Image (cartoon, grey):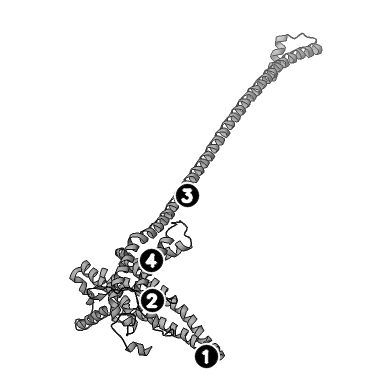
Amino acid sequence: MVNDPIHQFRIHNIFGPWNIFGYDIAFTNSNLFMGIIVLVITAFLLLSASKKSLVPGRLQSVGEMWYGMVHNMVDNVLGEEGAAFFPLVFSLFSFVLVANMLGMFPYFFTVTSHVIVTASLALFVVGLVVVVGLWKHGLGWFKLFVPSGVPIVILPFISLIEVISFLSRPISLGLRLFGNMLAGHIVLKVFAGFVVSLVALGLGGIIGSLAPLFMAVALTALEFLVAFLQAFVFAILTCVYLNDALHTHH
Amino acid sequence: MATTTETTETTGHEEGGAFPPLDSSTFPSQLFWLVIFFAALYLLMSRLVLPRLAAIIAARKGQIDGDLARAQALKDETEAALKAYEKSLSDARANANAIALDTRNKVTAEIDGEQAKLDGELAAKIKAAEEKLAKAKAKAMESVNDIAADSASDIVSQLTGAKVLKTAAAKAVASVKN
């Protein structure tokens, strides 16, 4: 069971099961890590902002870079009107980033390796785009699906493609993150499992285990990159989609 | 591991048969707690954390802008002071030139006056001397006539033994002279 690469994704109850309207909302290890994520983000950022020095120290610099990066992203993509969405984009980015990073610790649970979590966040973002778009532009917002300057003959066809592309956004947004985290962790576990299995075979196995050991180390570095990159991609796509809600260009 | 996946399904999450990330029996609890924790995160960020970070960054920006503005003000002040200094310097230079010119004119005028006075005095002295000379000359010329008349009457009396009247001799001298 130790070598089972799927074991790390298993969910078990810590408290519960509790039933509400027939649904089991037991507090599980996944939910525990959601709480840890919130705690880590809040504690780290509050600590980094505690000194309020004019010339920032190391910790404060990281906090300010974190803030500045998301702020620039929102500012560049959404402009002035996007300021209202900055806390949301910041929360999304931070949640995904810290979830991915915590997942890199051995024996820690990776919240973002569960499709329900990533899909919920993605659906929330796209749902928000629809709500904000309709609230800002009324029914005129649907012109988003009718690009200008297209010959009338192929316009229905283009509109159909636009609608499909819009509907596929939550799928791509959620599945991209889920797939990356799931596959990365499985591959890591598989290579690490090779090392253990080969070492058990004796001297020849120990020498042979060097190759998968090297792979596991290299993949760990790659996974750290992926962990950051996926959080960044999630945040910037959120901004790009929100941009459609704020500024319809027809 | 493949065998366990086949066995039980509904007893709970722990022995859940399906591939865990796709096990729909865990979805309600995941969703429920995700909403709670993400809402908590959003509230903590928007109400507590982000305003603090924004305040720090804004304070630094304000400080830098203030410092830059003060530096600019000081620079302007320096430039104004330099301009004033240069102006007073050029004023003083012009003043000095004026004084020098004035003094030179005054001195020149004084010298010219002295020169003219001296020339006048000299001219008067020369004139007086010339007059004196002319007078002496005229006097000498008169004496010459007398001497000539005396000499003439003496010569006549010596030669002829006749007495010549002084007036006649003077008359004769005057006629010869003319």
| Viewport quadrant of the C terminus of chain A | bottom left
User: Is there a contact, CB below 8 Å, between mark 3 and mark 4?
Assistant: no
Q: Position of residue B83 (x, y in %)?
A: 48, 45
Q: Position of residue A73 (x, y in %)?
A: 36, 68
Q: Earlier in the sequence, mark 2 or mark 1?
A: 2
The residue sitting at 74% across, 16% down in the picture is B148
Kind of residue at badge 4: Leu
Kind of residue at badge 3: Lys
* Dot 3: chain letter: B
Tag 1 secondary structure: loop
* Dot 1: chain letter: A
Kind of residue at badge 1: Leu
Q: Position of residue A112 (x, y in %)?
A: 36, 76
* Dot 2: chain letter: A
What residue did someone put label 1 on? A201
Residues marked 2 and 4, same chain:
yes
Mark 4 or mark 1: which is in front? 1
Residues marked 3 and 4, same chain:
no
Within 10 Å of disc 1 (Cα), the crowding (few <14, some 14-19, many 20+) is few
Q: Measure how far apart labels 2 and 4 are at the Cα level.
A: 15 Å
Within 10 Å of disc 4 (Cα), the crowding (few <14, some 14-19, many 20+) is some
Mark 2 or mark 3: which is in front? 2
What residue did someone put label 4 on? A39
Tag 3 secondary structure: helix
Q: Measure how far apart labels 2 and 1 are at the Cα level.
A: 31 Å
What residue did someone put label 3 on? B75
Mark 3 or mark 4: which is in front? 4
What residue did someone put label 2 on? A110
